[in-house]
Amino acid sequence: MKTFVLVLSIVAMVAVARPQGGYGGHGGLIPIGPAQYNFQWEVNDPPSGNSYGHQEHRDGDNTKGSYYVQLPDTRRMLVEYVVDQFGYHPTVTFEGKAQYPVGPGPKPGYYP
């Protein structure tokens, strides 16, 4: 019985000590409102062929952004998107013409 009372006391202390409301446990000191942010980043490393990036803008429930990546066939894939209360709406486009350089390795075809 003593153990039960001890456990019940600990649970009650934890519940009372837990910060109430607010964001991140700050007791309501940080106001909660619609999300608003902008960000952008990119990577461009010609020796490795890496070229990709992402940018996004959000104001409340509406988000607009785009990201791109350099594909192995030398094209650049661009995805522009909008996120609203109805979901994610991407538009995918490709820039450039696919190129498949011939390099070392087996030639295409059937090998028994």
Image (cartoon, grey):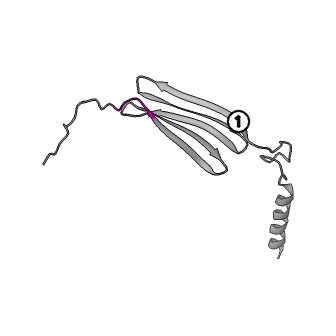
Is residue 36 placed above or below 2 in the rendered structure?
A: above
Quarter holding residue 60: top right
Is residue 34 placed above or below 70 in the rendered structure?
A: below
Residue 58, given in percent of the width and then of the height, sits at: 68, 38
Q: Which residues are magenta?
A: 94-98
Is residue 87 placed above or below 98 in the rendered structure?
A: below
Quarter holding residue 14: bottom right
Tell me the crowding category of disc 1: few under 14, some 14 to 19, or many 20 or more residues within 10 angstroms, Cα based.
few
Which amino acid type is marked by label 1?
Answer: Tyr
The extreme bottom residue here reads 1
| Residue in the picture at 83% in, 43% down | 31
User: Between residues 46 and 35, which one lies in front from this camera angle?
Assistant: 35
Residue 111, given in percent of the width and then of the height, sits at: 14, 45
Q: Which residue is mark 1?
A: 37
Quarter holding residue 95: top left
Asked if the stretch drawn in magenta spans residue 48, the answer is: no
82 on left or right of 103: right
Residue 65, given in percent of the width and then of the height, sits at: 60, 36
